[in-house]
Amino acid sequence: MAELSLNTRYREKQFEADARVIVFDGSRVTSSNIADEVRDLVTRRPLTRNIYIAAPFINGVDLECLLREGVAAVRAAAGLDEADLRLWMLDLREHGGELRIEIQDVAATEADGSPAGAPSGTWSPIAPELIEGWLFDLFDLSGALVDAPPGVHFTKSSGKHSTQFLRTSSTLLSTAACGFIAMAALAKLQHMQPRRVFVDTAPLLSVVYAMSSVATVRGFWASMPTVKSFSSYGGKDKLPQLTMGDMVLISASTSGGLARELLVLGARQEMLLTIYYLASARNQQRLGVVACDLTVQADKTFGYRQLESHPAETCPLCAKGFVRSELEGDQFLIDRRSVKRLRLLRATQQDDARKLFEKTVRTGAWQVPIHSTLLGRSALEFRREAILDEDGVFEKEFGRLLQRFTPSPLDLVICVGLDASMLQNIANRAGVGKALKDASIVSHAELERLKLGERKKRNALVVFDVLQDHSQARTINAVLRGICNGGNVTYLAALTAADTARAATDLDVFLTFGERGRDTFTFKSAGRVLLPYNTDESSSWSRERALLQGIANNRVLEPQLQSRLEWLQGAGVEHEQLFLPAVDGKKLQVSPDFVFLATTERADKVSQGDIFAIVSNVLACARAGEDNATLGKAPGRDSSVPAWRQTSLFQTLLCPSNFKDFNDAILRAALLRGATEQELNYVLNDVVSAEMLDLLVGQLQTHQSGGGDALPEFLLALASGRMKLTPSHTVQLQEAVTAANLPAYLKQLASAIVLTGASFQSR
């Protein structure tokens, strides 16, 4: 029974017709098998005019005998009213010191019209485009041109980026396929017995075994050569010195880069074969020999269009925010990426966090460094005077910590974020000022330069205003372990921030663990909070400034945008004017019944910095995953931590339902500013992008009736490239924006969506 049937179109003068090859597997082929396959093919596809019979693992003489004694040609002729079917046998033969695939006619009818079935005995070379056409059909039927799932692109070991990948191993799933490829490969390479064969990926070992069987049964090779896979670009430098007797096979190529490097290493052109080749540039030079060129050409009836490939430095797919899936050899991605929707609920906010914010808002404590994106730090700062000055938010709690946990006697005090005078004032008000008088008080910057003389047991106190740089705390801990020599060390913080519960737990263990176990040292904090740490290269306000500067370079900014740009250029650490005003020019403020904060009293004192801090905390809790582990419910040491980020297997997107569930404009604005660029990258999933498009169109319609206070922030997120929709949804949004009656400054802002949204170029 045939294992493989491949088809291609051939041209004969002004006509085109099908040419099909039936490839028989194994060495136990019978004449009845051949006759049955021919009959079935003619029955199923009566317009086929040329049928070729190939049996890679038996020689041409044996195939001739099978056709001579069988009735394949008779059955072929019986299936046609017109006697124009041509039946051919196909074999690999030696001719003039070279191997080539030749064909011999098996006559369908005699001159008088009576059926006949004997081969003609005359061999002739087959048209090369037929072999390439059948190899293309094998490649296409096998799905070997792999498309990356939405939002993903491949990064290849050659250094190129693309959304498509040639996977030759998909074509090597039967011995019949391997045998046919082996015949095509032997016909392309120099006719000689190789001493060694090197393949770029392990699946090609099956092709080499098939080549050996095909060549040995015909007497072209005497024995099986040694074979080794060198793992493409990753292992080429470990290849031994290539010699005249070495054959090298490359599974697939889109640039010819690997062939070029192998030639430099000593491979010979006539012994270097690329099985499948698809060009990625015009007039691209092919090196070595190629079994099948998949690139469509004017004189061919098959082929794919040129593959788009990009250098890593200028890859537009990276600029779109597509996730990189690294490939090595034949590794690839086949499944559609799952989507994790980041959703905020009232239950997402923990009770301890709500109490902390009820205490800290309305004091001007929460501030945002507008253009700072320090790694290992949150996008928020806590104003020191608001928390540690007299009657400050944490002044009493911090004083009690000093009373209870200051080591006695105290030899050394390290101040981080506050100076000696502020610490002394706090201690005096707490009634422990005398404990600090005889101690050396230094800043953390002076600690490593401090010379304490001989090694002896010392007690130390480390005080932080806000502990959010955990690496800094670990560095101080490491230094103190060397100079305190077994003394008591206490770490006190007015406020401790961490991006995950696991990070907070790890910090606590690190600072307290020692030779006497977990409680060797002491670490206490008056307040604790989860806050996301910076992950994007620039803040949303830096992106906003860059956008407005870009618009200003080409046209005069509308007054509202000009004043906004001037504020951004002079802004430092701010707690107001963080969000664009509503369409009517009013500042965004918290509304009654705000879901994450009680607003029955002094709602006008709640700053935009307060709201941004609350939303940032809720986002951090939501990213903790289904278990919602927080500072009060840290995950176990051996439990996995949910990875709410982008990978080649899943993507995390801020669910558009958040903007529907929470209609407070200031909350929406804080969400847009607090979410990461990847969480707003809806180009990664067309379903979520469509949901976001519906919401944005709704905002435009609401604006017509006097609502849509968050519309400026939505348009800004799109124009700056932080929020992205799919290309088709971007076009639909542009049409909706054009139809809406927007103020001049919003039209100017929306015009930038065409520049960034359609091409998705990140600044």
Image (cartoon, rainbow, N blue to C red):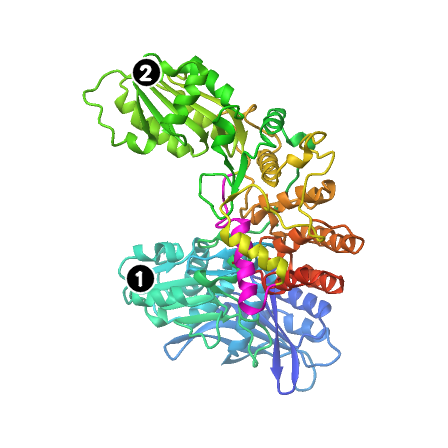
Please give the residue where the numbered disc 1 appears in the rendered image: 195
Q: Main SS of the magenta segment?
A: helix
Q: Are marks 1 and 2 in contact (CB under 8 Å)?
A: no
> Does the magenta-highlighted stretch encompass residue 543?
yes
Question: At numbered mark 2, what does the secondary structure look like: helix, strand or loop?
Answer: loop
Question: At numbered mark 1, what does the secondary structure look like: helix, strand or loop?
Answer: loop
What's the magenta region?
533-557
Q: At x 69% / y 86%, what residue is drawn? A: 112
Please give the residue where the numbered disc 2 appears in the rendered image: 410
Question: In the rendered view, does 349 fall on the left or right side of 468?
Answer: right
Going by the picture, which residue comes out furthest to the right?
Answer: 705
- Report the amino acid beneath label 1: Arg
- Expressed as whole percent of the image width and height from the top left, the position of residue 584 reads 72, 53
Q: At x 39% / y 34%, what residue is drawn? A: 471
Mark 1: few/some/many CA within 10 Å (<14, 14-19, 20+): some
Establish if 555 lies above or below 113: above
Question: In the rendered view, does 431 fall on the left or right side of 316?
Answer: left
- Does the rendering let one see residue 33? no
- Does the rendering let one see residue 447? yes
- Which of disc 2 and disc 1 is earlier in sequence? 1
